[in-house]
Amino acid sequence: MKTTYDIDIAVVGGGASGLAAAAAAGRDSGGRATIALFDAQPRCGKKLLATGNGRCNLTNRSAKPDCYHTDDKHALNRVFSCVNVDDTLSFFENLGLVCREEDEGRIYPSCGQASAVLDLLRLELERLHIPEVCGCRVESIRRTAEGFSMNSPLGVIKAKSVIVACGGKAAPNLGGVDWGYDLLGSLGHSVTRLNPALCPIPVESPHLSSLKGIRAHARASIRDERGEIYSDSGEVQFGEKALSGIVIFQLSSAAANLRGDGMWVELDMLPERDGDGLTAMLKRRRTLLPHLTLENYLTGVFNKRVGMCLLKQAGMAPLSRSVAELSDGDIRRVAAVIKGWRFPVSGRAQWNSAQVTSGGVRLSEFDGLTMQSRLCKGLYAAGEVLNVDGFCGGYNLQWAWSSGILAGRSAAAK
Ligand SMILES: Cc1cc2nc3c(=O)[nH]c(=O)nc-3n(C[C@H](O)[C@H](O)[C@H](O)COP(=O)(O)OP(=O)(O)OC[C@H]3O[C@@H](n4cnc5c(N)ncnc54)[C@H](O)[C@@H]3O)c2cc1C
């Protein structure tokens, strides 16, 4: 096979982390290093364009190591000590991006377009004379005396240093693949178990079909027989066979490794009231509304369909009965369901609907001050291919930027 590239730094993967790595390497080398970026897709940044519903929630003001799952918190701390949120914002400001902070510290481009983030990164590569070689999947990688030799459909790529930024398995429809794990695995790295994360949780309930599309505020927790695994408050969205919404995404990540039989999602549909306060409120409604049928007993508290399902779940059917017929025991049962509506987890989450991969190549095998492999000198990694996944809300892109910029700078310094 002919050698098509013989360069100093090869960046494998043209997503968020690879583009940031190539730009950082180009800037820091001041034009002294030859750099090229290779991507399997016909165009770079396909997933980036879909982020934040097309608006790109590119970081979060509160991004810090506690907001991530990883095998090596110490290394993660080091990465963020080298490139934090402010450093990332000035990196983008220097590219010409103006950002705006919204609720809960989420930061977006002011223009509201993910495409602006991609365009500015690509324009920077153009300015730095870094070619984007698309439609070029790196199929294998081998250590040589001079550096690395990689096979691709376009020929052999030789490079003194390689930055692997191949992303993870999440969202295969947007280019998510598991190739990066194999490339790093072939150079001696180990991969943890991989699970879809930040995704809807499949659950079973006879009520889901009538609730489809409804959103409600709740405190949601994921549990098994040993107790609560994780909980959070926010908007839950009911789907036909799954629960969704940002709060459910957070639960899916926290429980990604544990997902299996015997888990359930529990919704507290009125977290602002304790059990006694709720029981008192329900009794007051019985006194106030004795002329209604049960169908409307919870109308005005919850979405009507949610209210009816809560009553059915508490065993109150038929709902044609009068509110006046409710006993104190009935009210206690209704209150118990409102405070802890159970949805048994019915199966594994799907890669197609996941935003990130939980698990990946062990971060502990990389130096958190440089992103260089501890096993193979000259090899760097960045982004989702590593075992780091964060909360929903700009945290995962922040990881891609921090690790990508650091890997690029370190490779250039070398
Ligand atoms: C729908 C959706 C919305 C999201 N929204 C947000 C959000 O608003 N905020 C946030 O923080 N996170 C968000 N995320 C998560 C975020 O997009 C990812 O964490 C981030 O894109 C990971 O960047 P990456 O560079 O590691 O991987 P990717 O962006 O997946 O890029 C990897 C690239 O590597 C290429 N590649 C892989 N293997 C090879 C190979 N062997 N040879 C050549 N090329 C290869 C792929 O083609 C791909 O272009 C979202 C994810 C999804 C799916």
Image (spheres, rainbow, N blue to C red):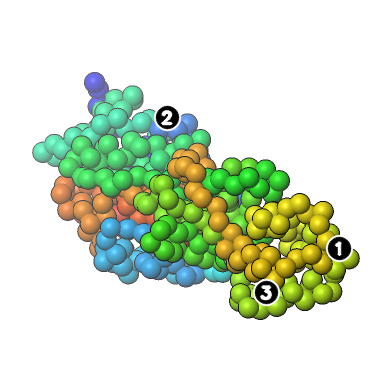
Residue at 29% over, 25% down:
155
Q: Secondary structure at mark 1?
A: loop
Nearer mark to the viewer, of 1 and 2: 1
In the picture, which quadrant includes the N terminus? top left
Q: CA distance from mark 3 to mark 2?
A: 62 Å
Residue, far left: 145
The tag earlier along the polypeptide, 1 or 3, is 3
Above or below — where is 276 with respect to 366?
below
In the depicted view, which residue is nearer to us: 255 or 60?
Answer: 255
- How packed mark 1 is, by other alpha carbons closer than 10 Å (few <14, some 14-19, many 20 or more), is some
Q: Is residue 30 left or right of residue 57?
A: left
The Cα–Cα distance between marks 1 and 2, rounded to whole angstroms, is: 65 Å
In the displayed structure, 210 sits above or below 58; it is: above
**In x, y percent, where is residue 117?**
53, 52
Residue neighbourhood size for the residue with mark 2, other residues' Cα within 10 Å, grouped as few (<14), some (14–19), many (≥20)? some
Image quadrant where one finds the C terminus: bottom left
Q: Which numbered disc, 1 or 2, marks the residue that appears first in the sequence?
A: 2
Quick check: 301 left or right of 350?
A: right
Assess disc 3: are there few (<14), some (14-19) or many (≥20) residues with their C-alpha within 10 Å of its C-alpha: some
Query: Could you say whether the residue bearing mark 3 is in a helix, strand or loop?
Result: helix
Tell me the residue at 71%/46% (across/down): 210
Residue under circle 2? Answer: 135
| Residue at 59% across, 42% down | 241
Residue drawn at x 19%, y 40% as measured from the top left: 187
- Which x, y percent locates residue 305? 74, 53
Residue farthest right in this picture: 291
Q: Quadrant of residue 275?
A: bottom right
Mark 3: amino acid: Thr
For label 3, the residue is 279
Q: What's the mark number on residue 43?
A: none
> Residue 292: which disc?
1
Residue type of the residue flagged with mark 1: Leu
